[in-house]
Amino acid sequence: MTQTVLSVCGIGKVFQQYRHEIYRVMRWFSIKAPLDEETWVLRNISFSVEAGQALGIVGRNGAGKSTLLKLITGTMRPSEGEISVAGKISAILELGMGFNPDYTGHQNVFYALGLMGYQHSEISSIVQEIRDFSELGDYFDQPLRVYSSGMHMRLAFSVATAFRPDILIVDEALSVGDAYFQHKSFDKIKKFRELGTTLILVSHDRMAVLSLCDRAILLHNGAIALDGEPESVLDYYNALLSQHSDQSIQTRTLSNQQIQTSSGSRKITIEDAILLDANGNATDTLDVGDRATIYVRALAHEHVQRLVLGYAIKDRFGQTLYGTNTFFSDQSTDDVGAGEEFEFRVSFAADLGVGTYSIALALVGGESHIGENYEWRDLAIIFNVANLSKQTFDGKIYLPSEISVSRKPSV
C-alpha cells in the first residue's frame, strides 16, 4: 500500500499591511484594529504526495511557489488549511537560509544540521563526506561571507543531502551552480529517489523537471492551474507564458491519456497534421533511418503580415531533440489574406533510437511564438520508431559508425 508522506488541504496564505505596527500587535491579542490591505498569495491549495514520488512545482515569479515550500517546511504558518507531513524533511530554499555568514563552512555544517535535530556525534561522523562532496577545498574553513553564490549552493546541497531524508525539497538553488556540480547533484537526487526519498522540486528548468519528476503542479495566481504528468503541465505553462489578451489556451485528453495543449489567437489554425512515410502514406510507426514527412494544412481566418511554421521533435519525456522554423530557413510567407490555405511538408530522416516521439507545431508571425502566436499545438503528432533493419544500438539517435579492430599475435 502506498504511503502518503505529504498532505496539503485547503492551504491559504495572506499577508496583511497596517498603517501602524501597534495595529498588528493589537491583532495578536485578538483586538479589532484597522487593516490597510490584505494580499492572498495562496488560496485553496490541496494536493498529496506519495512516498517515493517526485513532484515538480512550476509557475511564474510571484505565483506562490516559494511561499508554498516555506509552509510545507514549517518556516511559515498558513493563514488557513492544514499540512500533514510524515517523515523527515530536508530543504534547500533561499541560499544562506539556516547558515551564519560569520561561521566557516565547517562550523555551519554543525550549526545547520544541529538546527535540523541531529546530534553532534552524528554530524561529526559525516562532516568529512560533506567536505568531500562539496569540493570547496580550503574555502570549507573560510567564513561564508566570502563565498560566491555557487559556493553557497555547494555547501547548502551537501548539508541538505548529508543524511537521506524522507522528503527532499529543492527551490531553484541548483540554478546558480556550475554545470559540473549540477550534474553531480542530480545524480545524488536520483540515487535518493531509488532508495525511496520523495522529491519536491521548484524549477524554471524544463529539462530538470522532465528528467527528475514523474508529476508536476502548475501554480498560477496563487492557485493550482494544472496537476498532472510533467510534459503536459510544462506545455500548458509554456502556453501561459506566451498568452496575450487576444489568445486562448485549450486542452484535450488524447487516446493515450496525455493532455494536448494548444494556444494562440486562432487567426490562422492547423486544420490537419499527419506523418507520412516515404511512399506518402499516413503512418505512426517508422523504421530507424526511414524518410518521413510532416504534412501540415493551415487555414487563415484573418489577414496577417507574416506566417511562419515551426516544429519540434521531442522524446517521450518532452525534451526537444530538434526544432526549427521557416523563419530561419528564409521561407516565411508575407501578406497573408483571410481565407488562404497553406500546405507545408517537412521531410527528414528518422535517425532516432527505438521509442515513442511527438511533434509540436507552431503557426506564428515571426522568429518565435512569444510575439504573435496564431496556434501552438503540443503533441500534434505522436509516432513510434522501431529497429527493423539496423544493427542493435542504444541511445536516442542513430549514429552509425565504423569500428576497426586489430589483433596482434602473442610473441
Image: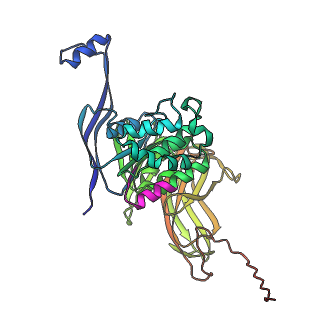
Give percent across and percent down for residue 300. 53, 50
Q: Is residue 316 visible?
A: yes
Give percent across and percent down for residue 189. 46, 54
Label tally? 0
Image quarter of the C terminus: bottom right
Residue 141 occupies which quadrant of the picture?
A: top right
* Vertical arrangement, residue 59 with respect to residue 298, above or below: above
Residue that appears at 43% across and 53% down: 261
Residue 191 counted in the magenta span: yes
Q: Which stretch is magenta? A: 187-199
Residue 312 versus residue 224: which sits nearer the camera?
A: 224
Give percent across and percent down for residue 4. 27, 54
Give percent across and percent down for residue 292. 60, 71
User: Can you name the residue that lies furthest to the right here?
Assistant: 411
Residue 329 counted in the magenta span: no
* Vertical arrangement, residue 251 with respect to residue 146, above or below: below
- Is residue 58 rendered to the left or right of residue 166? right
Q: Is residue 283 visible?
A: no
Residue that appears at 64% across and 66% down: 347
* Vertical arrangement, residue 75 with respect to residue 253, above or below: above
- Is residue 115 rendered to the left or right of residue 133? left
